[in-house]
């Protein structure tokens, strides 16, 4: 029987879609698999119920402040002890910076392979075949025949549809391994909290520095509102203080996998493409027909974003109203 340890980032006291995708994929395998979940953050009934509905066998957690506040050394040493005890063949997680940092520490300590930002995975004959971007997204790398203990973080989108598989997991509170006070976390705050997180959003409308000012982001917000989407931003925009870091998409921001991505008034720098290259459908709007973003979109509109976007928003309002949406 294969044993999977799934690291769950519960710091916002909710389950991100990538966790449900991983649970769906593991439970779809044509073999007996045991799934243990380790929750970083404070556990609650909704979080527990979600893990149960999607097929967790064991749920490990702790009410210790240093785990609830994601003290990196306490979390690492606690999970390391758990790995030594339950000996999972695979250690999986989402691709947030907290999860990837933890997996990096674990893989290095155990001398095992680490694969971050996996976008596709298959299992055949007890070995894995995976795909992931490398060199800042310039190349898609494929790996086959992976059968040793591995550590792997996933981007959203590894399955098309999540599937429920109810189980009755046992809930175990575990003892946190202290880090000898090398690091003490006193408080954690999560700013820019939204109804829909960028990494879970199905529609994202992103604006770049070409918008000229923070006030002009109103046309981005209007389109996102009409479509029921979420606003994104480039690093240049965030560095200028126009939008919060929680909206930054790219190599130093968030990696997103929406069904529909609008790239408005942004050039398409490599660092930004890293964050949105896995989008299902990309619409680019830019007045510069030579902008690199046009080489990475499904539909390109050469035009003034201040004319195109308001007109598009008004037409979508009419269409959506006619359809009763």
Image (cartoon, rainbow, N blue to C red):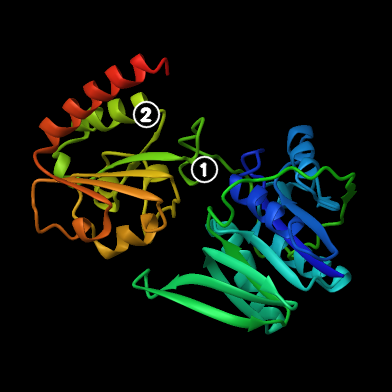
- Residue 46 is situated, as x and y percent measured from the top left of the image, at 74, 33
- Is the residue under label 2 in contact with that under label 1 (CB below 8 Å)? no
SS at mark 2? helix
Nearer the observer, 58 or 65: 58
Q: Position of residue 6 (x, y in %)?
A: 72, 59
> Percent x, y for residue 49?
79, 37
First reached walking from the N terminus: tag 1 or tag 2? 1
Q: Residue at x 16, y 39 (%)?
A: 211
Q: Tell whether 292 sits left or right of 80.
A: left
The residue carrying pointer 1 sits among few (fewer than 14), some (14 to 19) or many (20 or more) residues within 10 Å by Cα, namely: some
Q: CA distance from mark 1 to mark 2?
A: 15 Å
Mark 2 surroundings: few (<14), some (14-19) or many (≥20) residues within 10 A: some
Q: Is 190 placed above or below 279 here?
A: above
Q: Secondary structure at mark 1?
A: helix
Q: Which residue is mark 2?
A: 227
* Nearer-the-camera pick, 23 or 271: 23
Q: Residue at x 73, y 42 (%)?
A: 42
Which quarter of the rendered picture does the C terminus lie within?
Answer: top left
128 to 99, vertically: above or below: below
Q: Which residue is mark 1?
A: 200
Q: Nearer the viewer, mark 1 or mark 2?
A: 2
Find residue 252 and report its horizontal and vertical position in percent: 38, 59
Q: Is residue 252 visible?
A: no
Give the quadrant of residue 133. bottom left
Q: Is residue 171 above or below residue 178?
A: above
Q: Quadrant of the N terminus?
A: bottom right
């Amino acid at each position: 029987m294969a044993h999977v340890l799934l690291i769950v980032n519960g710091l916002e006291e909710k389950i991100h879609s990538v966790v449900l995708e991983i649970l769906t994929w593991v439970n779809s395998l044509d073999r007996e698999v045991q799934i243990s979940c380790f929750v970083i953050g404070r556990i609650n009934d909704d979080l527990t119920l979600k893990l149960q509905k999607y097929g967790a066998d064991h749920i490990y957690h702790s009410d210790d402040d240093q785990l609830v506040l994601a003290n990196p050394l306490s979390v690492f040493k606690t999970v390391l002890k758990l790995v030594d005890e339950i000996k999972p063949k695979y250690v999986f997680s989402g691709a947030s910076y907290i999860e990837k940092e933890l997996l990096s520490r674990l893989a290095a300590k155990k001398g095992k392979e680490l694969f971050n930002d996996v976008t596709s995975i298959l299992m055949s004959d007890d070995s894995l075949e995976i795909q992931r971007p490398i060199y800042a997204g310039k190349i898609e790398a494929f790996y086959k025949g992976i059968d040793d203990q591995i550590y792997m973080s996933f981007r959203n989108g590894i399955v098309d549809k999540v599937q429920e598989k109810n189980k009755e997991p046992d809930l175990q509170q575990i003892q946190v391994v202290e880090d000898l006070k090398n690091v003490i976390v006193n408080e954690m705050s999560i700013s820019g909290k939204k109804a829909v997180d960028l990494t879970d959003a199905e529609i994202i409308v992103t604006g770049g520095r070409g918008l000229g000012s923070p006030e002009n982001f109103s046309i981005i917000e209007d389109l996102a509102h009409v479509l029921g989407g979420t606003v994104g931003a480039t690093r240049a925009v965030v560095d200028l203080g126009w939008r919060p870091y929680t909206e930054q998409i790219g190599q130093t921001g968030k990696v997103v996998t929406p069904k529909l991505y609008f790239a408005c008034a942004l050039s398409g720098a490599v660092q930004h493409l890293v964050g949105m290259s896995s989008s299902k459908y990309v619409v680019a709007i830019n007045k510069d027909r030579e902008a690199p973003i046009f080489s990475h979109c499904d539909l390109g509109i050469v035009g003034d974003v201040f004319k195109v976007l308001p007109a598009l928003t008004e037409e979508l309002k009419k269409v959506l109203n006619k359809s009763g949406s």
